[in-house]
Amino acid sequence: MELFELQQNFYNVGQALKANKEALANAASDPSEDAIKTIEALNKQGQALQLRYDTLKKEYEDAKAEQTLKNKNKFKNESKELDPKERLIKAEAAWIRKTVRPDNAEFAEKWNEIKEELKDDNTTNGGKLLPIHVSNQLIAEPFATNPLRDMENMSTVTNLIMPRIAYEISDDGFVNDGDASKDATLTGGQVVFGRHQYKVRAGISDTILLGSDVGLVEYVNNALNSGMQEKEIKLATDTSATGELAHMSFYDTTTVNIKKISGTDMFDTIADAVADLDDPFQDKVQVLMSRKDYNKMIRTLANGSRDLYGKQPEEIIGYPVKFSARAVKPIVGVFSYGQWNYDVNGGLYEQYKDYQHGMNYFQYTAWVDHQILLPSAFRIVDVTASK
C-alpha cells in the first residue's frame, strides 16, 4: 500500500474512532433502557476501531520513516552524480532557504540532509559555504565592482599579522634609509589586521526563494558581492573617515598619510608621482583614477586630435589603469601593498525581515580590515588649477 493510501486510511479510522467516542458519551447520558444495548455495541465497535487505528498508525509511521530514508539516500546519490559546482549550488540554495524561512519544515529537512552530506553542523552556521567565496569564487557578474579587488591582495585569515617589509640591509655600516624603511620605523615592523563590522543584505522575494537553485544562488551571491565591493571601495577612498576606520583609506592624513605630488597638469603630475617612488616599486606601478579625470587629461593631450581616444589607458599613461568614480584624486603605486582581510570565522549569515515593506532578506555580517602595508609604495596625485 502506498504511503498516501496508508495516510488516508489512518485518517479515516481516526475520524471514525472520534465519532464513536462522541456517540458513546451521548449514549452514556441517555437514561432509557435501550441505551444500555447502544453502549455495549458502541464499546465493541470502539475496541475494534482502536485496534485498527493503532495498527494503521504503526504501519503509517514505519512507511513514512522508510520513505524519508529513501528520499535521503536518493538525494545523496543524486548529489554524488553532480559535479562539485552543481553540488555546491544545491547546498547553498538549501542553506539560503532554511535561513530565510527557518519555520519552513521542508526547507529545514532539506538543509539537514545536505548538512549531513557536507559533514557540517550547527556550530558553523553554514561556514563551509558562502564565506569561502569572499574573494573570487562568487557566481555571476556583480552589480557593483571594486577595482581594488584586481589590484590588491585579499585574505581570509583570523587574527592576521604581516611584516611591513620583507627584508632590510644593515651590515657594514649601511642602513636602509628609503621610504619603506622609514615606514617600518615610524609605524612598526608588523601590520596587525583588526575586525571592523559591516552588514550587507540581499532582498529575496517568494518567486526568487521558490525558484531554481541556480537562480537563487546567483541572485543572492550577486547581491551580497555587490554590496561588499561597494563597501570596500567606499572605505578605501573615504576622504572624511575618522577614528578606527580612517586607516583603511588611501586619503587618510592621520595614520596613513600618503605623500602627495602636486602639479597643474594631470599627465605630468602622474608621471612625477611615479618617478617619486623608490626604484624597487617602479616595475609594478598601477594607477587608480576616475574616468572624469582621465577624459579631461585626454582632451588636454589630444588638443583637438582624435588619435588618442582609441588607445588603451596603459598606452597613454604608460602604466595599467583602473577606474573608480570614488578616486577623487588619482592614486599611483604598487597596490599589492594594500590588503583586505575577512575574518570568515566571525562572519554571520542570518534572516532579516522588513515588516514595513514585507520583504525577506538574507543578511551577511562581515568582519573586515583594509591595511595599507607600505604607504611609501603609493603617491596621491594632487592637481590644482594653474594660475
Image (cartoon, helix red, strand yellow):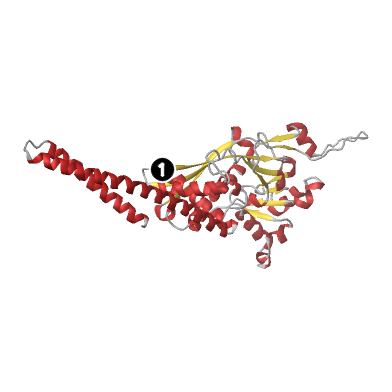
**Pointer 1 residue:** 353
Q: Nearer the viewer, residue 364 or 80?
A: 80
384 vs 171, nearest the viewer: 171
Q: Quadrant of residue 294?
A: bottom right
Tag 1 secondary structure: strand
Q: Residues within 10 Å of mark 1 (few under 14, many from 20)?
A: some
- Work out which quarter of the rendered image holds the N terminus and state it: bottom left
Residue 315 visible in this rendered orientation of the protein: yes
Residue 294 in the figure: left or right of residue 91:
right
Find residue 134 and report its horizontal and vertical position in percent: 60, 47
Give the percent coordinates (x, y) of residue 234: 57, 44
* 285 up-or-down from 308: above or below: above
Report x, y in % for residue 66: 44, 51
Q: Position of residue 241 (x, y in %)?
A: 58, 37
Name which residue type carries label 1: Lys
Front-most of residues 253 and 183: 183
Instruction: Give the residue drawn at x 46%, y 45%.
Output: 99
Residue appearing at x 24%, y 43% in the figure: 47
Q: Position of 79 compared to 28: left or right?
A: right
Q: Is 245 placed left or right of 106 in the picture?
A: right
- Looking at the image, the residue that sits furthest to the left is 32
Q: From where the camera sits, is residue 220 visible?
A: no
* Number of numbered tags placed on the structure image: 1
